Image (spheres, rainbow, N blue to C red):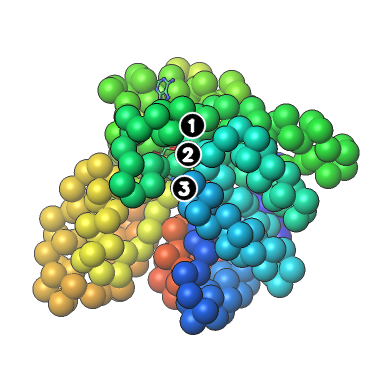
Amino acid sequence: MSGFLLTGTAPTRARFSFEVFPARSGAAALALGHAVQHLAGADPDFISVTYGANGSNREASLDLLRYLRDHTDALPLAHLTTVGESREVVRETIHAVMDAGIHDFLALRGDPPRGLDEGDPSIAGSLSSLELVELVAEARAERPRMTSVGRTAVAVYPNGHPLSRSRTEDIEWLLAKQEAGAQLGITQLFFRSEEYLDFVADARSAGLRIPVLPGLMPVSTSAQLRKVASLAGRPAPVELEREMEESGGFAPELGVEYAVELARELLAGGAPSIHLYTFNRHEQVLAVLRELNLLA
Ligand code: FAD
């Protein structure tokens, strides 16, 4: 386990981390166990585990975090969301994760569950990610010193969060997360290196000091490409979209090629590391790392 971002040791080559999500069926869980072994074997800085809005998959998230802890050498990092949950339940969840020996968090507000919108009182009244960062710090302070180490990461939106009205607002909100105690940023997906590099440069000029990991996903299908475009808030690159369609909507090698180029530009531009959204598969993300010569 290297964990340079989490321990402060200088890396000899660019580093990387992964995101996985809890399996939704027994068969998917078997496949995920296999994928996770390959991912952990690549020696990432950490493997993060997503968390469903409304605590909908709290137990599945915790199970996967424990699996990483018990069956791999990778450092598990727990996503946490607050949407639709009371302060007390969020506090209990933080302690349940820490009781499992996991102390690294990605503090998120979460998206409204299907059927609810931002204006719903249960959503509008949810704790923000800022309050969650503070709550994690409070929970750490309540525990014995030896078990309270760990870092708190927060989400970053190079192309703006849908609720934000301007880049200035996005940057101010990110700076507020830093002030609340966040030590690391991880970005939403995006397609072009300048979207990340320009945003980080602007945020640095405004006072951002924490590292920001660019989030990348090597897409395999046209449907994934459309999903990434909707998360990125930008259209997919026309050529990639066309080539993917011409391959019948399934072409993992195209997604790998695109992610490799993007990662090269990001690392050359000063990104400290890359965070790969795996979609619970190891083949494509490991192909990206191999191509970048980042695997030992
Ligand atoms: P917040 O930081 O609380 O707020 C979102 C935005 O709202 C801010 O960026 C800002 O623009 C605006 N805003 C809010 N309050 C204010 C204010 N007082 N003043 C000004 N502006 C304000 N979702 C899940 O459900 N589970 C996951 O596991 C998950 N993992 C993710 C991982 C990453 C790396 C990223 C980038 C996103 C992830 N998400 C996940 C999605 C995330 O929960 C949504 O994008 C959600 O809409 C916002 O969460 P947040 O923590 O950024 O929210």
Q: Can residue 9 be seen in this view?
A: no
Task: Give left or right: position of 102 versus 121.
Answer: right
- What residue is shown at x 34% (from left), y 53% (from top)? 262
Q: How crowded is mark 2: few (under 14 residues within 10 Å), some or many (20 or more)?
A: many
Taking the image in four quarters, ligand 1 sits in the one at top left
Label 2 belongs to which residue? Answer: 83
Label 1 vs 3, first from the N-terminus: 3
Which residue type does callout 1 highlight? Ser
> Where does the N terminus fall, quadrant-wise?
bottom right
Is the residue under label 2 in contact with that under label 3 (CB below 8 Å)? yes
Separation of disc 3 and disc 2 at Cα? 6 Å
Label 1 belongs to which residue? Answer: 126
Q: Position of residue 273 (x, y in %)?
A: 52, 49
Task: Give left or right: position of 117 versus 285.
Answer: left
> Where does the C terminus fall, quadrant-wise?
bottom right
Q: Where is residue 215 in the image (x, y as percent from the top left)?
A: 43, 49
Secondary structure under the numbered disc 3 in the rendered image: helix
Q: Residues within 10 Å of mark 3 (few under 14, many from 20)?
A: many
Query: Viewer-proximal residue, 4 or 215?
Result: 215
Query: Viewer-proximal residue, 254 or 279?
Result: 279
Q: Can residue 121 be seen in this view?
A: yes
Separation of disc 1 and disc 3 at Cα? 11 Å
Label 3 belongs to which residue? Answer: 53
Secondary structure under the numbered disc 1 in the rendered image: loop
Which residue type does callout 2 highlight? Val
Query: Viewer-proximal residue, 4 or 280?
Result: 280
